[in-house]
Every structure is written in structure tokens, then in C-alpha cells.
Amino acid sequence: MSRSYYIAGNWKMHNTRAQSAELAQALVTELKDGKHKYLVAPTFSSIETVSAIVEGTNIRLGAQNCAAEEQGAHTGEVSVLQLKDLGVQTIILGHSERRHTYKEDDVLINKKVKLALKHGFEVILCIGELLEEREAGKVEEVCERQTVKGLEGVDASDLGNVVIAYEPVWAIGTGKTATPEDAEVVHAFVRKVIACLYGDNAASKMIIQYGGSVKADNAAQLMAMENIDGALVGGASLKVDTFVPIAKFKS
Ligand code: 13P
């Protein structure tokens, strides 16, 4: 298996520019010898500041969302052209907070995915079920739908720029992590969905991150599972002391 681990920090709506700069600077120092692939996704207003700090390092620069259109009359939105201008390399799309709090549906997310890929970005497509969907036995149905619809119309040649993040909504920010075994079942299933869409070879190369209360003390067990290729970290990505041990977990 040739997949490498990919550890990403989603800073969500936290940190001023000064706080973001301090965190980014410390991560550049701490992770410079890190063995895995890394990313930080600051809030929009801190992207330019962080861009100057991570440029040329082994830490990629991410955004947490983008508009579905390139430009125009879209008050409050940020375009892929503007993100490119800031040095953003990766865009997180379909995060559960976008899906559930801001009511983004699969059609809108798919439009964003295709636009971001067209402009050469890497996309982290987030999928994951609500607690009531899990309790109703709908985990596979939800994850399959979000994966298939999120990637609808995406050409196989663009798949190298796609990462999936499985983030069960009930595990986000709650301190309740999925057990490595439970997460592995879903990751293996999602890889099968990718295989049905694009073939076994593409599926075996797809990076599938886990997200939802990842901490230093559960990261290694999660990533020891065959189909878990990294982590998308929220709360624990906001402090050097909590993110670095995850980023440098021992495989
Ligand atoms: P937490 O790590 O805070 O649970 O957040 C996960 C997440 O939503 C990352 O995108």
C-alpha cells in the first residue's frame, strides 16, 4: 500500500491573525522533520498571514470553504480565484458544519468540488452521518450518498487531488471518538464506494482521513487501522502541544 498519512488541522472560526501567526510559526518549527503530509486551514481572515509563514515548508495551506461561483454578486462569499491569490492549495468542502448549520446540500457541495478541482486545488471532501442516522442504521447509505454525489462528474484524472474525510457528526467536538474498529468499517466501505466509481487502483490510492475528537491519545490507534490514512483535527489543532503529538504520531 503506497498511501502516506495526511494530518490536517481545521482551525474553524478561531484565532486572530496574531494568534494564527504564532501557531503557524510554531508548527513550522515543530513539524519540519515530520514524516507525514500536513495541512493547516485557518479562518479566511488569517489565510494571508499564515500563507507567508508556511510557504515553502512541508505544511500545506488550506481554506475551510469556497463559493460555488468564480466571481460575481455573492455577498459574503470567497472565490477560488481569491483563495488561489492567497496561496491556498487545498479546500475543505462539505464539512458537517457547512452541511448542517449552513444547509449546504450535496448538489452545492458537488459544484464547489468541481470548481475547486478545475482550478487545480486539492479538495478534502467531508462526509459523515448524524447520530440519528447512525441509530437508524443509515451510516452506509449516508456515506455512500455523500461520496457519490460529492464526486458526481469528477473525472478520474482529477482523483489524485481528492481526499475524503470521514467525520461522524456525533464525534465532532464532543470528545466522543468513534472506536478505531467502528471508523475502520466505514473507511473500508467508503473505499469500496470509490472502487465502484473509479476502480480498485484509484480506490487503493485514495487518502481517507478520520475526523471527530482526534487527540494525541487516540491518534495512533485510529491510524493503525488499514483504511485510516490520516486525521482532520478540529479542537486539538488549535494548540501546538495538542496538535504536534498527533502530527508526529508513531506509526
Ligand atoms: P474536533 O476534532 O474538534 O472534534 O473537530 C473535528 C472536525 O470537525 C475537523 O474538521
Image (cartoon, grey):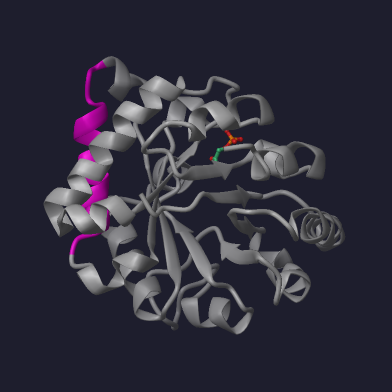
Q: Which residues are magenta?
A: 136-152
Q: Residue at x 41, y 40 (%)?
A: 100
**Residue placed most toward the observer, 167 or 77:** 167
Estimate the x, y position of residue 125 in percent, counting from the top left. Answer: 39, 54
The rendered magenta stretch, by its main secondary structure, is classed as: helix
**Residue placed most toward the observer, 68 or 245:** 245
Report the label total.
0
Q: Residue at x 44, y 83 (%)?
A: 72
Estimate the x, y position of residue 233 in percent, counting from the top left. Answer: 59, 42
Estimate the x, y position of residue 182 in percent, counting from the top left. Answer: 37, 22
Q: Residue at x 22, y 19 (%)?
A: 137
Say which quadrant the C terminus sits in.
top right
- Can you see residue 31? yes
Q: Is residue 89 left or right of residue 12?
A: left
Whether residue 140 appears in magenta in the rendering, the answer is: yes
* Location of residue 144 with respect to 176 vertically, above or below: below
